[in-house]
Image (spheres, helix red, strand yellow):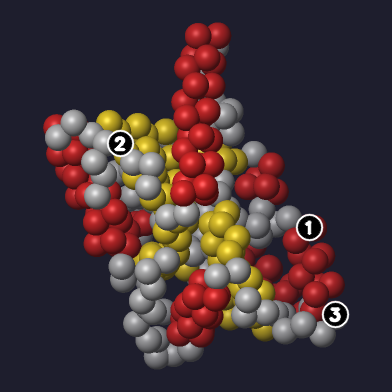
Amino acid sequence: MFSLFRCDDSRVLDEIVTTVRRGVEVRVLVTPRARGWTKRLGGLTTLLKDTGVTIKQYDGPWAKYHAKYIVVDDESAMVGSLNLTRRCFENTCDFLVHSVVPEMASTLNALFDSDWHTPHEPAPASDRLIVGPDQSRSRMLGILEQAKSRIRIIDHRVSHPEVLLLIARKMLEGVSVQILGRGETGGLWSHGKLFLIDDDLAVIGSASLSRPGLDIRREVSVLIADPARVHELSTFFDQLVSEGKARSKNQDGNLCDEGEDDDEEENDD
């Protein structure tokens, strides 16, 4: 089962068809709306239905089903920021967490089943997952509040007023804050969301630090506390900063396509 926001990659679609033909049950929960994708979402839904996929358009209380997650055989789970599109596979900076921790799969299963059925149940509680908008704002603010020395963010939509106020206060307290957005992610379009708190915690998921991302959309993010994984992500972030400084000395211009049809448009609520 998986949550789908956009998908136009033929290899992914072929694999879905192959999986169904092997007798595997495939359930897909698709967003009711995505900017510029009204007709394509309808065509995608029809295509998947015709191949034997059990698919339903989300009809819950939130404006968009923007979460990106997959659960396989109730054992393996993936949560991230990327869409199943050629652009995200080839041209954007995105993040995806793969886990075989039982709690991850069971919590996502419970969320999927709740959002599939009507009426909808409250989002399941989990220490590892942050499910929005039920939990996003309070938990994201709480995580940022924990920072003692530095906050590092990859997100091109850091605009929620409460987040901005908290970041400003943290800076006055002496916390170092680095935010990478458009044109600052290794020459790729910025689409992924990564938040690093000191050298202790990381958060990866679909939710940006914006009003839509924290207040009005179904989003899923995962909290990472494993030292090795946090160190790996910290190294990646610092490498992007170093590469960005080197590029700025040798070229001008914005590395991000300003016309990118991103998922986080502020006025589409």
**10 Å crowding of disc 2: few (<14), some (14-19), many (20+):** some
Farthest residue, direction front: 227
Measured from the top left, where is residue 81 in percent x and y? 52, 54
Figure check: 101 above or below 253: below
Which label belongs to residue 10? 1
SS for dot 2: strand
Measured from the top left, where is residue 166 in percent x and y? 19, 44
Q: CA distance from mark 1 to mark 3?
A: 16 Å
Q: Earlier in the sequence, mark 1 or mark 3?
A: 1
Mark 1 vs mark 3: give the one in front.
Answer: 3
**10 Å crowding of disc 1: few (<14), some (14-19), many (20+):** few
Instruction: Quickly name the residue at label 3.
Output: 21
Q: CA distance from mark 2 to mark 1?
A: 41 Å
Tell me which amino acid carries mark 1.
Ser
Apparent side of residue 172 relative to residue 142 in the rendered image (left or right):
left
Measured from the top left, where is residue 218 in percent x and y? 41, 68
